[in-house]
Amino acid sequence: MVESPDWRDREMAALRERLSCLSQASLRINESLDFDTVLQGVLDSARSLTSARYGVMTLLDGGGGVREFLTSGLTSGEAERLLLTPDRWRLFEALTNIDEPLRLPDLTAHVHALGFTDFTIPLPVEVFRFMAAPMFHRGVRVGHVFVGDREGGEEFTDEDQETLVMFAAQAALVIANAGAHREVDVGHLPTGAAGDHGMLRRAAGVGWPLNSVIGRQAPEFLHWALTGG
């Protein structure tokens, strides 16, 4: 089948628009030198350019545990419910034991097939479209980025997946560069000390101090959430 000139023109126009959006997002991200601000910009851009309603980014410590939790598009209440999902860390492990991006038309159906039959999405959506991409730097996993609930209820596309992978790589580079310039690895500090370095204030995402979002002491709450209570 011969492709029509009009179809090719539309495809080229769409590609140019996508590349322009990616370039603008990268410029906005690079305008800031603040570690937290840059990572939040990466997550916001990944969510926006994949037409997703929600985004989450997790950063890992040297032992593979979650040391930071950022969100995009979630209210404070939604962020709390997500952080407190039953069996959250076994489920997290099941969804992140991947070396390649993961794209699902229905997250709930996939999770049920993994054996988490009581799982429900703690968000106001019926069918949750989902994508995940691991963040690697020089072969070391440093985190993950997730997006979900695509605009209009449509499934994520190949182009969306490529975009997510690109931003995952960008986030990994940001983390590596930040680590190279830090004299102290805050991921290995006691919980209270890490909070002093601004790590805990990102746990609820959306840029608010955790203890103003959730009516508990932030370090105590995050420790309780990460360790399962």
Image (tube, rainbow, N blue to C red):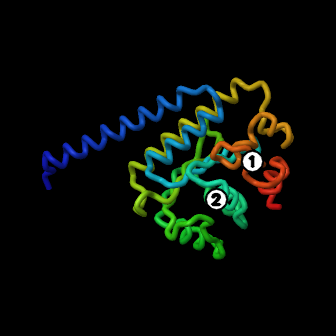
Q: Residue furthest bottom?
A: 117
Compared to residue 119, the image places residue 224 above or below, namely above
Compared to residue 116, the image places residue 55 above or below, namely above
Q: Are marks 1 and 2 in contact (CB under 8 Å)?
A: no
Q: Which residue is mark 2?
A: 78
Residue at left offset 41%, top offset 32%: 23
Quadrant where the N terminus lies? bottom left
Q: Which mark is residue 20?
A: none
CA–CA distance in space, label 1 to label 2: 13 Å
Left or right of 32 on screen, residue 88: right
Quadrant where the C terminus lies? bottom right
**What's the residue type where badge 2 is placed?**
Glu
Q: Foreground: 205 or 91? A: 205
Compared to residue 174, the image places residue 56 above or below, namely below
| Residue 176 seen in the current view | yes
**What's the residue type where badge 1 is placed?**
Leu
- The spot of residue 55 in percent (x, y) is 56, 51
Secondary structure beneath label 1? helix
Disc 2 residue crowd, few under 14, some 14–19, many 20+, Cα 10 Å: some
Q: Which residue is mark 1?
A: 210
